[in-house]
C-alpha cells in the first residue's frame, strides 16, 4: 500500500521505521508547506514524490493512504480533504481538538471510498488485547491507575523563554492532548465513559496545561489518570480487581504486561516485541484490505474516539483551556 505523509517531524520518521518489517507498507510520497522540507524528507526516506502542493499530492492516482502528523488543530481539515479525494487516512492522535471536528471527519468518511483510523498506538498492541482478556480473571475491577509522565525535550527552552509548539495551546497542544490522551483512550476502550469526572491541573504562563490528574467515577469502580509534560515518572499502570491485578509497563505503548493473583504472585507475563507503531500500521493496512466499511468502524474503534473527544470537550471546559 503506497503511503503519503503530511508532516515531516520525528513521529513520521518513527512510523516509517516501524513499518520496515510490514510487507504491504510502501513509503511513497510527502507533502510539506515548503519544497525544501518536502525534498529533505523525501531524500532521507527515498520517497518517489515530494511536493508543496497539497492538491497535487492528493490527486496522485498512485497514492492509496495518507498518514497525518501535523499540529492537532489542523488534523480535521487535512483528514477531510484526503477523504474527499478517496484516500485512506491514518491520523496521529489526538484525532482533532473537539468532538464536532471528529463528527465532520466521520461524515466525510461515510461519503468517501477511503477509511479513517485514529493512530492511538496503545490500543492495537497485542499486550493491550491480553489485558482485555485478563479482565474477567481479576474481576470485578474496582480501581484503575493509569500514569504517563514524560519530561518534554522542549521544556528547558520554555524555561528560557522560548515557547515551541509543544507548549502553544493555540495549536491544540499541551499535556492533556499530547500525553493525557494515552490514559483517557484505553480507559474508555476498556470500561466506557465515566459517570462523572473531576480534574486538577497546572497551567503554564503560555496557557498550555503542563500536567494533570483526572478522577473518574463509575458505578462500581474508580479510575485515576495522571499525566505530565514537565516531570518524569517510571511508575507502571495497573488495573486492580477483587481477584488480582494487571500491571502494564507503559500505558502509552504497552510492551510487557503481567497478571498477578491476590498474593502478588506473577501468574502470567506477556510481551509485545515489535515497535509499538507497527501494530497500528499493520492493523490499518489489513482492515483496509478487507474492504468492509461497516466492520471497519468497529475495527478502527470509532466509538472510542468519539467518547474520548466528548470527554476532552468536558475537560477543556473544566480547565478553561482555549483551543
Image (cartoon, rainbow, N blue to C red):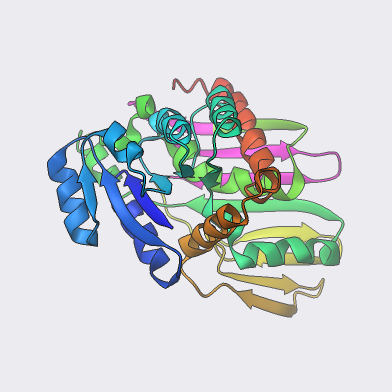
Is 112 one of the magenta-colored residues?
no
State whether residue 172 appears in this view: no
**Quadrant housing the N terminus:** bottom left
**Quadrant housing the C terminus:** top left
- Picture coordinates of residue 227 (x, y %)? 51, 45
Is 207 one of the magenta-colored residues?
yes
- Picture coordinates of residue 184 (x, y %)? 61, 43
Total number of numbered discs in the rendering: 0
**Residue closest to the far front:** 61
In this picture, which residue range is highlighted in magenta?
Answer: 201-229
In which image quadrant can residue 135 be found?
A: bottom right
Question: Is residue 91 positioned above or below 136 on the image?
Answer: above
- Residue 75 lies left or right of residue 196; in this view the side is left
- Picture coordinates of residue 25 (x, y %)? 42, 62
The residue shown at (52%, 57%) is 285
The residue shown at (39%, 55%) is 2
State whether residue 274 appears in this view: yes
- Picture coordinates of residue 99 (x, y %)? 58, 26
Q: Is most of the magenta stretch helix, strand or loop?
A: strand
Decide which of 59, 158 is in the foreground and name it: 59
In which image quadrant can residue 210 be found?
A: top left
Amino acid at each position: 500500500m503506497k503511503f503519503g505523509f503530511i508532516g515531516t517531524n520525528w513521529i513520521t520518521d518513527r512510523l516509517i521505521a516501524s513499518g520496515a518489517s510490514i510487507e504491504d507498507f510502501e513509503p511513497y510520497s510527502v507533502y510539506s508547506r515548503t519544497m525544501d522540507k518536502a525534498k529533505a524528507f523525501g531524500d532521507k526516506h527515498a520517497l518517489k514524490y515530494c511536493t508543496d502542493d497539497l492538491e497535487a499530492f492528493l490527486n496522485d492516482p498512485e497514492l492509496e493512504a495518507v498518514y497525518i502528523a501535523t499540529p492537532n488543530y489542523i488534523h480535521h481539515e487535512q483528514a477531510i480533504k484526503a477523504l474527499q479525494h478517496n484516500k485512506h487516512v491514518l491520523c496521529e492522535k489526538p484525532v482533532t481538538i473537539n468532538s464536532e471536528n471528529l463528527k465532520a471527519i466521520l461524515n466525510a468518511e461515510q461519503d468517501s471510498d477511503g477509511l479513517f483510523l485514529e493512530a492511538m498506538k496503545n490500543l492495537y498492541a497485542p499486550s493491550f488485547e491480553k489485558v482485555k482478556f485478563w479482565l474477567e480473571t481479576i474481576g470485578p475491577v474496582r480501581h484503575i491507575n493509569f500514569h504517563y509522565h514524560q519530561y518534554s525535550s522542549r521544556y528547558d527552552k520554555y524555561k528560557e523563554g522560548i515557547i515551541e509548539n509543544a507548549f502553544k495551546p493555540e495549536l491544540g497542544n499541551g499535556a492533556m492532548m499530547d500525553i493525557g490522551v494515552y490514559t483517557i483512550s484505553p480507559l474508555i476502550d476498556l470500561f466506557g465513559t465515566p459517570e462523572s469526572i473531576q480534574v486538577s491541573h497546572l497551567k503554564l504562563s503560555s496557557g498550555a496545561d503542563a500536567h494533570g490528574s483526572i478522577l473518574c467515577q463509575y458505578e462500581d469502580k474508580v479510575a485515576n489518570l495522571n499525566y505530565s509534560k514537565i516531570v518524569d515518572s517510571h511508575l507502571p499502570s495497573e488495573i486492580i480487581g477483587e481477584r488480582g491485578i494487571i500491571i502494564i509497563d507503559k500505558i502509552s505503548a504497552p510492551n510487557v504486561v503481567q497478571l498477578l493473583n491476590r498474593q502478588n504472585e506473577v501468574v502470567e507475563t506477556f510481551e509485545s516485541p515489535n515497535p509499538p507503531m507497527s501494530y497500528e500500521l499493520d492493523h490499518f493496512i489489513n482492515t483496509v484490505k478487507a474492504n468492509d466499511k461497516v466492520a471497519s468502524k468497529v475495527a478502527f474503534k470509532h466509538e472510542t474516539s468519539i467518547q474520548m473527544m466528548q470527554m476532552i470537550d468536558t475537560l477543556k471546559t473544566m480547565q478553561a483551556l482555549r483551543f
